[in-house]
Image (tube, helix red, strand yellow):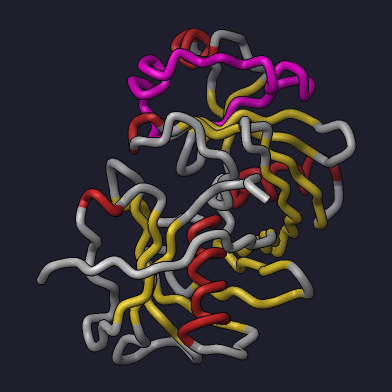
Amino acid sequence: MLRGAPAGAGGRAVRGAGAADAPPPALRAGAALVSGPPPDPPPGGWAIRWFTPAAEVDLCGHATLAAAHVVFERLAAGATAVTFASRSGPLSVTRDGERLVLDFPARPARPVALDAALAAALGARPAAALRATDLMAVFDDEDAVRALAPDLARVAALDARAVIVTAPGRGCDFVSRFFAPRVGVPEDPATGSAHCTLTPYWAARLGRARLHARQLSARGGELWCEDRGARVAIAGRVAPYLEGAIEVPA
């Protein structure tokens, strides 16, 4: 059960502001906070914000899956679709059997020059480098990605929020890893937002829209992606393992 990316998702009866209040710093490690529908939400809309241990971020896939699960199972029991108002615009999540499917904005990458700083940070020279929201390093095979032991201090010093590394996969279309020490995430177990960049890249390279991906973190992650032009669909499973209540003083 303990595979993929752990995320905490919490709901508050916050209405009228259009976004949930920020949680206390001690509760921000991999958290998504959901509030009730803002004044002018998209149909079925809720508001969502995401927090790493070090920063608020503008998009987070695994925490959105967790938040959708909370909505479907607790806050709007029986619902099969939800739209969140977010810093990245409206984001919808739908049920598809045992999976939940995210509809996220595509973030296509453009080629950039390989520089020595990226290779030194990763401890290996990639075959190509690209940039979207994050840097992306492309390697020739899965083993090279699996073997990486990056210098996280050097990764944090790069001119990028985070670094995605990727290669063709065995038994799947592509593999990846994601390093974001600058925002308090040395290596993310499974990163939906990275697949907003990976999906259009591999769809163009492989010549097909539907892709099966694995993330080679210690916990591992498995995702099913579809290139939809300006949007990407990213599907995954949710395995709830802990539920409770935390009282936060006003």
Question: Is residue 182 placed above or below 141 in the rendered structure?
Answer: below
Task: Reply above or below: 139 against 202.
Answer: above
* Residue at screen point 20% across, 57% down: 24
Percent position of residue 83, x then y: 51, 80
- Residue 111 in sight in this render: yes
Question: Which residue is at the far right?
Answer: 171
Image vertical order of residue 19 relative to residue 107, above or below: below
Residue 124 left/right relative to 204: left
Residue at image position (76%, 69%) is 98
Residue 156 image-quadrant placement: top left
Locate residue 220 relative to residue 44 in the image: left or right.
right
Left or right: 196 in relation to 229: left
Q: Split into 4 quadrants, where in the image is the C terminus?
A: bottom left
Residue at 72 percent across and 67 percent down: it is 99
Task: Between residue 221 and residue 111, name the one nearer to us.
Answer: 221
- Provide the residue span drawn in magenta: 136-161
Tell whether position 131 is magenta. no
Q: Position of residue 64 (x, y in %)?
A: 50, 64
